Amino acid sequence: MEPIAQAASDEPNPRVLINVNSPVTDQSASPAMMVGHEPVVISPTRPTLSDVPNESSVNGPDNAEATETQPDAPKASPRSNEEAPVESEAPASAPNTSEPQQAVSEVVPPAPFVSAQSSPTVSTPQFTEQAPIAPSIGMGGNSLSGAQFPVKKGRRKLVLFGGGVVLVLALTSGVVFGWCLPNTPNNVYNTGLSRSGKALNSLIIAATDKKKLETYKTSTISGSIDTTVAKSHYTGDFTTTFDKASLNGGLNVALTDAQGKKEALTAKVLSQIPSGSVYPNIWFQLTGLKTLGLDPLFPQVGTYDGKWIAVSSSYLQSIGAKYLNTSDNTQTQITTEDIAEVARAVSGVSQQYLFSTGTDKAVFEKRSFVGKEQVDGLSVYHYKVGVNIEHAKAYCVALSDATISTNAYKKVSGRTAAEITSDKTSAAKDCNQSTSDAIKATDTYDLWIDGHYKLVYKFRIYDKADKGLYTDVGQIYKGGDTLSLFVKVHDTHDSVDGAFTLDTDLNTNQTNGTLIVKSTSNDFPFNVTVKLKAVLSSKAVQVTPPTSAIKIEDVLKSLGLDATATPEQAATLPITKKADDSERQTDIRALQAFLEASYASNGFYPTLAQLNDQTWQKANLKGLDPAALAPPASTAKTLATKASVTQYAYVPENCDADGCASYTLSALLSDGSTFTKNSL
């Protein structure tokens, strides 16, 4: 008689292992009824719910807290962002035996986990074909053996069938409580908000760790820009390394205009704060000054191209003493710990309100479950949420109170304790009023939660007047110690899309940022790409002051500026008036260009009423900067029939019901003369 060995299978489904290593007398009996010298051990493996992340870490956390009745779920193995099917562990090894082995042909799905412990040995029972003996079943080290009672074949089949049904039901119950319940929309929503708050708070705490901040006192920020506007192309890059007292940076900019003309500008900056002072010594060098177009205003500016210019600490102090109380400035400098305190304050309050589902503080309220979707390559749960107005007010008040209480606020504002208390009261009033004005109880927003990691993926805010204009704020987590935050803006009407992403790696102490803004509008197409990188370091900043630098006082005098003039006095200088007149002339020329473009499209020039109508302006003068409608230092938004210090003039001529055939534009200059442009 061939002995029956352990069931072997490479299939992923759980198995019941039946180990028998002694021959039996009845080959026709079911494998489950075979009896040998060792007890039969039922040892099903525990199913693995790979899509239920582990609560102990952000990388694949457990979803056990989603419901109070949920049993402990096994840890998940890392997978893709798709929800994983139930998997099983590998079957336990069969006991060593010298007898040939044979696989069991049928295996029953497992019941709830029973450990496959070695069972105590029993004496070999005596049996005959007429009186079969019930099997010895090892369970937790105990066994039942030796009981002699007749078992018919029909009953054996019924026992096997019933046992299989029980095992299937038990497995189904395990899947329901370990998989289905945690992944119901309500539990995913609750867990997603809660765990997102914990993850963000953990990230802030790790990033602002005091020991890390003390170790990495130097920061290096670098970046690049690549911009195309119409047919003009701009590129640039910069690198700046700084610590608490020193800075070493550089900037390079290149321009290629629509005609193919190329220009470049290079800037270098060095800075050091002397001991006991809050004002730094600064040295800077500019190469390619002609690119800035300053020659008409400062004819001598070209003589300083490529030369180092020095701005001393004492000079800055003489200029800033009127506006800055320096008696205790050494104690009011903002430190990295101050910034870290603000970050922790904001994170802590946000976790209590924004990332909460509690009825006492939760800002967001789940209105409905839209469904499971595939968004940006992720399997997500989509919800419609509203805002609890009273909780939103409380969140605003708590956030303001926590921020105002920080050392950074005290240092920046210079407020006394009594004044800070007053600021908190005023902020609370503003929160209550602004929240009521900005948010309505009927407003709804879209929320997506990552179905794999159970973290908030993104939150969408629509413009109330235009559903084609919306902003997405969210994060993408892919495991490890890297978190990606993003803000995206979409404007259907103006064909504009913008996205800013910020990737932080806590292991390498590096943060990368990318800003991409693109417009496909026929009126004003553009494409802007900005990349930033920040790296923490423990290396000291190297600053070597140039020996032949020219004093800033001498440069200002040669350009016709008073080096000791205050900002108020500088506004009355001839050079300032000349700059204002240049701006007035530029505005008039810009208005003329847009009016001619409008005439080419419409066949007429606007009346004064049309030109002053903002709706007409947006429809017919697309791309015009509203600031071009008003002289320097003026807030006027309309034109008049006579130019003044605060308004430009527009006088249309030969007008009928459709429009006008000509016009005159004018601006009043600082010397009392008038700058005029007529229709072409």
Image: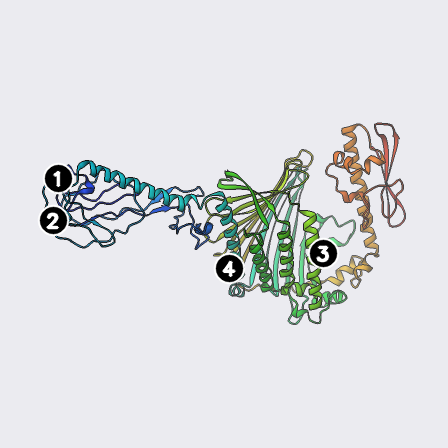
Looking at the rendered image, the disc whose residue lies closer to the viewer, 3 or 4, is 4
Q: Residues within 10 Å of mark 2 (few under 14, many from 20)?
A: few
Of residues 139 and 192, the one drawn nearer to the viewer in this rendering:
139
Residue 204 image offset from top left, x and y in percent:
54, 58
Q: Are marks 2 and 3 in contact (CB under 8 Å)?
A: no
Residue beneath label 4, please? 206
Of the residues under marks 2 and 3, which one precedes in the sequence?
A: 2
Q: Please give left or right for residue 438 compared with residue 645 in the image.
A: left
- What is the CA distance from the residue labelled 3 to the residue labelled 4? 47 Å
Q: Are marks 3 and 4 in contact (CB under 8 Å)?
A: no
Residue lying at 89% horizontally and 42% vertically, measured from the top left: 642
The colour scheme used to paint the residues is rainbow
Residue 296 image offset from top left, x and y in percent:
78, 49
Snapshot quadrant of residue 151:
top left
Of the residues under marks 4 and 2, which one precedes in the sequence?
A: 2
Q: Please give left or right for residue 243 compared with residue 286 in the image.
A: left
Q: Amino acid at mark 3?
A: Tyr
Which type of secondary structure does the marked residue at label 3 adopt?
helix
Looking at the rendered image, the disc whose residue lies closer to the viewer, 4 or 2, is 2
Residue beneath label 1, please? 26
Which type of secondary structure does the marked residue at label 2 adopt?
loop
Looking at the rendered image, the disc whose residue lies closer to the viewer, 4 or 1, is 1
- What is the CA distance from the residue labelled 2 to the residue labelled 3? 109 Å
Of residues 213 and 463, the one drawn nearer to the viewer in this rendering:
463
Which type of secondary structure does the marked residue at label 4 adopt?
helix
Residue 578 image offset from top left, x and y in percent:
82, 51
Which type of secondary structure does the marked residue at label 1 adopt?
loop
